Image: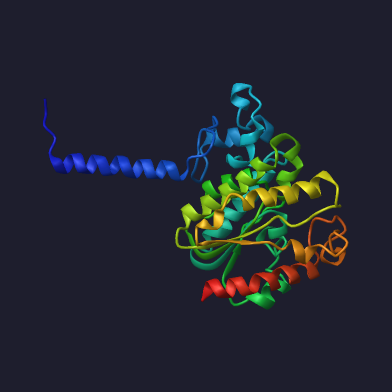
Amino acid sequence: MKRVGFRAVFVLAMSWLSATIAFSAIDYVYETGEPQKSGWPLTEAERMYVLKPEYQRRPGSEKMQYLPKFWPAVPSAGYWSGTAWLDTHAKLVEYIAKNKGNIDILLAGDSITQQWGSPLDNKPLGPAWQKHFGKLKTANIGIGGDKTQNLLWRLDHGGVDGISPRLIVLMIGNNNMFFTPETGVDAAASGVAACVKNLRQKFPNADVILIKILPAGEPGAVFFEDIKKTNAAVEKLNLTDDRKVHLLDLTADFIGPDGKIRQELYTQDKVHLSPEGYERYAGRLKPLIEKIMK
């Protein structure tokens, strides 16, 4: 039997440990049948997989099982129709590739993030951002309609490759509220937490400001109330035990004395923000960003 020297054993052990650490960094609560768990560009098998409607790819679907509690915390490419969502992601991958290297701030999230001003809309970052943070090199990877699971997939498939942000501003989870009757709010909160952990693993030197989901809709409606419950569930996850994670709650800024949203801060849909809403948002972000950047 061939003897293996100590050095060879040590190298093998360290290789195994490195592989174990790398695996744990992308280890999710459920493993789907997705053929390419990470990386960009996509293989042909992966492209065919993600072009199926999202409900056909949810955790459990490959086993004909109904497992909604896993949906928000397991990466899943979004789907609009045909290649539309994937093409949108590809456009942001290209945008990030043109901004490789050090940046000050990465904005990550859904439509509320996208509407700060996005390459997807051929718009620069808007007046509120420019007023308060115009000197900071910022990249925006928000996509309207994204849920936590969609952002997770983008982060793992080229969405942030090659950049090194000092700070990440994350707001995600609003679109998960459409599915809380199936998933429950605890699952939605776990999806938010998974996004934070993914970003911290990818960028261990960066701080993350997690913005709680903004109020939306009317008090008493399931959507409105589940936002409150999800935010409370996120609070219980103690994400700020990691000193580089900061939790910012803007609820009091966007809710009036009557318990309803401050209409002047929203558009007519009572979900998205008006220019005044973005000014309020930026104003509350500013002290925390300045503190972190110092």
Q: Does residue 60 appear in this view?
A: yes
Rendering quarter of residue 190: top right
Above/below status of 243 relative to 293:
above
At 56% across and 71% down in the image, what residue appears?
Answer: 137
Q: Is residue 21 left or right of residue 170?
A: left
At 32% across and 42% down in the image, what residue appears?
Answer: 17
Q: Residue 249's x, y, as percent?
A: 68, 61
Q: Residue 241's x, y, as percent?
A: 51, 57
Q: Residue 30's x, y, as percent?
A: 54, 34
At 35% across and 41% down in the image, what residue appears?
Answer: 19
Above/below status of 250 relative to 36:
below
Q: Residue 113's x, y, as percent?
A: 68, 59
Q: Is residue 220 left or right of residue 174?
A: right
Rendering quarter of residue 85: top right
Q: Does residue 51 appear in this view?
A: no
Above/below status of 53 relative to 97:
above
At 69% across and 52% down in the image, what residue appears?
Answer: 231
